[in-house]
Amino acid sequence: MRRYGKHTDEDDIRNRPNRKGSRPRTHTRPKHEDAADGMVLTVDRGRLTCLVDDRIVLAMKARELGRKAAVVGDRVALVGDLSGQKDTLARIVRIAERTSVLRRTADDDDPYERVVVANADQLAVVTALADPEPRPRLIDRCLVAAFDGGLTPLLVMTKSDLASPDKLLELYGHLDIPYVVTSREELENGGAAERVRELLVGRTTAFVGHSGVGKTTLVNALVPLERRRVTGHVNAVTGRGRHTTTSALALPLAGTDDWVIDTPGIRSFGLHHVDPSRVILAFPDLVPGTEGCPRACSHDEPDCALDAWVAEGHADPARLYSLRRLLSTRERTEGD
């Protein structure tokens, strides 16, 4: 065995090559000043379809982003091949700060939070008045998620030719949520799309609803085929003539620079991620009445100061009822 002293000859020592290359390690991430801005239109198995200027670019997330994932609606910065040609792939190197997020969990006991859509201004909750029957508790959950995520809710009621909207309007009228009522005939001839479109101009709107309520049919009417061509091969996700959606998809609203985002039909909407204390923020007329509440008040207990506040005439009792109904959604199943 060969031994070396304190003054060894460096030429006499064999250096083993670095199998990972000779470039020194660094924690400094590249700045990518030349990155181009884009928007995520849809995500499919790790590949993200983005709009860069007027081109559709397929991209993947850069390793340097770690576990941070981009979702539909995200504003991102991309480098690499941005030509949009077939078999090219760019890299997403930055995700801009989000202005809003629509989040959900599988159920109320599931701690895993999933961001469905980013940067939407409005959440259109689509429900049929019959066939299938409306599910108020599921609607409530979508409203809570909208309030928590910073989106303005919009209620879209379809199939009014089969049932009256009066019961739902009575239930949600005190929430001051804008709404539109449509029939099957209007969906088929395009009349409903025009009335809904008036409520979407100037905003990015995400559409949610369970299967069979006519959500994707309405989105298809809002985004004619000629506008879908802007998104190129993204059309393969929804498919012409299909009425189902397998992943969230952003589409340009006809005649505007705005966007509609179709999301997959939902069976449940978990709210494990929602802090109940934030729901009160959707009721600004009730917020002053919470100043006398005990610490960590749930606003649905005997010592809640809101009861006295409303009894003194500061707010409509129906508003307090609506607040407590929304707060109770985590304790109930969606099918109630």
Image (cartoon, rainbow, N blue to C red):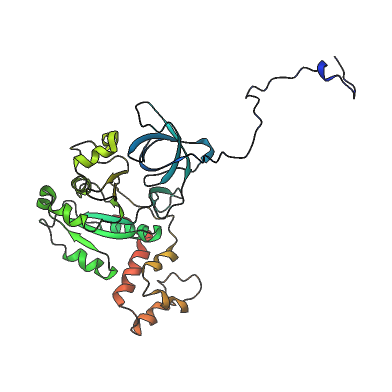
Give the image location of residue 88, x and y in percent.
Answer: 39, 28
Residue positioned 47% across, 79% down in the render? 292
Is 214 on the left or on the right of 141, as rendered?
Answer: left
Name the image quarter holding the N terminus. Answer: top right
Give the image location of residue 29, x and y in percent.
Answer: 58, 39
Give the image location of residue 178, x and y in percent.
Answer: 25, 64
Q: Residue furthest top?
A: 1
Q: How many marks?
A: 0
Quadrant housing residue 90: top left
Is 324 on the left or on the right of 33, as rendered?
Answer: left
Name the image quarter holding the C terminus. Answer: bottom left
* Above or below: residue 195 compared with residue 18: below
Q: Residue furthest bottom?
A: 312
* Above or below: residue 151 compared with residue 48: below
Q: Let me know if residue 172 appears in the view.
A: yes
User: Between 210 and 101, which is closer to the camera in this rendering?
Assistant: 101
Q: Let me know if residue 129 appears in the view.
A: no
* Above or below: residue 42 compared with residue 282: above
Is 266 on the left or on the right of 217, as rendered?
Answer: right
Is 170 on the left or on the right of 42, as rendered?
Answer: left
Give the image location of residue 311, x and y in percent.
Answer: 34, 83
User: Between 18 and 115, which is closer to the camera in this rendering?
Assistant: 18
Residue positioned 27% across, 59% down in the render? 154
Residue positioned 46% across, 77% down in the render? 291
